[in-house]
Structures are given as structure tokens and as C-alpha cells.
Image (tube, rainbow, N blue to C red):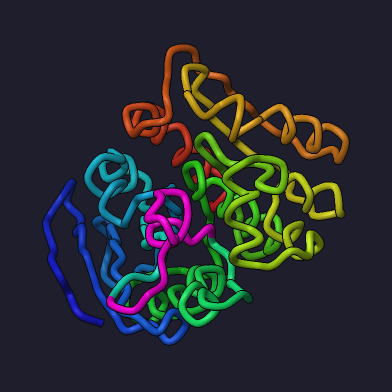
Amino acid sequence: METVSTNTAHGGVQGVYRHASKETGTEMTFSVFVPPHADGAKLPVVWYLSGLTCTNANVTEKGEYRRICAELGLIFVAPDTSPRGEGVPDDAEGAYDFGLGAGFYVDATQAPFAENYRMWSYVTEELPALVAAEFPADMARQSILGHSMGGHGALTIGLTHPDRYKAVSAFAPIVAPGQVPWGHKALPLYLGDDKAAWRKHDAVALIEDGARVKDLLVDQGEADNFLAEQLKPELLEKACADAGIALTLRRQPGYDHSYYFISSFMEDHLRWHAERLG
């Protein structure tokens, strides 16, 4: 692991790191905030998954999480959203919603993406092992949240591994990629045409198929220009109601899809996670 940069913030250390990933076959960059802590202490870990076009830098620079993480004693980890580098395949037309910056947190099975686009295994296996080895992380206390495409990733990963992640939340998540244009483009290109494979990466479908967590927190801006076509939180609301999952869905008037929205409610989410992490 190579240290790209470190900065002191709120008594802790904000670092950016790079390593060679076996899963993606590329170098991957991620950021970690470690709050102030006693020597030898092990701290709970919050994973944050970013949205379309983002890298680890977006939330690191705009998320406004460090003060509250320092107060609550939370390690905050922000991976990249896709493999990158020379030779990594991209969208054929260079569109923003597929390929580089748009890995959708799946392990691709379709050529030419299957070799590098293994973001599910990267986020759930390889990077956690690295974080456990290099940082004062208590891996028995992990939680996960994300935004948009990353909200989709947080929900699907959390629903698939309910015993690993003690809390799951999202900002403006893509709750049902199998039912919206972003998913209709990305899922067949990454996973093929078998819609049964899509259901494993669709929060609403996972809940319909029996996946369960105790509760979920979702914030959605009512002025989000992707709300009606791509996000459809009402589908998650119905799925959770039918399944008996306690969903707190907060519709926030005036807020859009940006980090102005995310940063406004980041503290609420982190306090909600801290309560469940113990």
C-alpha cells in the first residue's frame, strides 16, 4: 500500500492511499479517515460508496464527515467507483453512466468487462482485508452507506451480508436498477441478459426474494432531477412494507442530487450508524 497523502483533520488523519488490486488488475485509490483514538484501540468502520462519475475524492472533499467521525470514533473508508487505467474498457461512446466511474458494484461476467470490473469482490473482500491489516479497524463492527449508484451498492451489499454490516443507509439510491434506464444499460453489459443475475444486484428484488435487514435509513431530495425516472424510492418503500423492514425514508424538500444534499444529512446518517455499531 502506497500513501498518496495524509492531512491532520479534527485531531485525526485523513489519508489517501493506492494499491495494486488483484481483483481489478489495476491500481486502485481509496481514502480513509482515522479519528483520534487511544493507542491500541480498535474502531468501527463505515464504508461509503460513491455514485456515477465519482472517485474516492468527491466525498473526501465535499462530504463533511470528519468532524462527526472524530466525535463518534468512526473510521470512514471511501473506495473508487470502478477500475481505472490504460487498457481498462469503457463505455463505447464515453457516456458517464457506464464503464469508468460507473462500476455499479458488481462482478462483471461479460467480455470485455469481466477481467477488470470486479467491484463487488473488491469492496466486500479485497479492500476490507487491506483495511483490516493496515488500520486500527474493528472488522466485527462494520456498516455501509452510499449515494446514488453507491446507494444501490450499499443496499445490495448490506442486504446480501446482513450479519457483517450492522447498519445500512443511503442518499438518493438507485433502489431498483432492474426497473430503470441506468440499470437497463449497465446490468446486461456487465452481467448478461439473464435477469435472475440482475436480481442479486437490485435492492427491491433482493427484498422480494427474501433478503432482510432490521432497518434502513434513506434520504431523498425532492428536487432531485433523477427522482422520477431513475431512483423511484416508492418501490423500496413498498418492498420494505411488504417484508416488514423498518424503512425510514425521509423526503427532503428543496434538495437535489448533489453533495450539498449529502453533506446536509451526513451527520444524521453517521449518528444512526454509530448507534448500531455500538
Q: Nearer the viewer, residue 31 or 165?
A: 31
**Where is residue 238, by image quadrant?**
top right
Placement of 130 over or under 262, stated as above or below: below
In the image, residue 1 lies in the stretch drawn in magenta: no
- Residue 95 inside the magenta-drawn segment: yes
x and y, in percent, of residue 18 in the image: 25, 75
State the image coordinates of residue 16 (x, y, percent, origin top left): 22, 65
At 78% from the left and 37% from the top, the residue drawn is: 240
Viewer-nearest residue: 136 or 58: 58
Asked if one can make out residue 167 in the rendered structure from this viewpoint, the answer is no
User: Mostly what secondary structure, the magenta segment?
Assistant: loop
At horizontal 28% and vertical 69% (from top left) the residue drawn is 29
| Rendering quarter of residue 179 | top right
Residue 246 percent coordinates (x, y): 74, 35
Where residue 170 appears, as percent x and y from the top left, is 54, 41
Write the start and end of the magenta stretch as one range: 86-104
Q: Quadrant of the N terminus?
A: bottom left
Residue at the extreme front of the image, as rendered = 93
Residue 18 visible somewhere in the drawing? yes
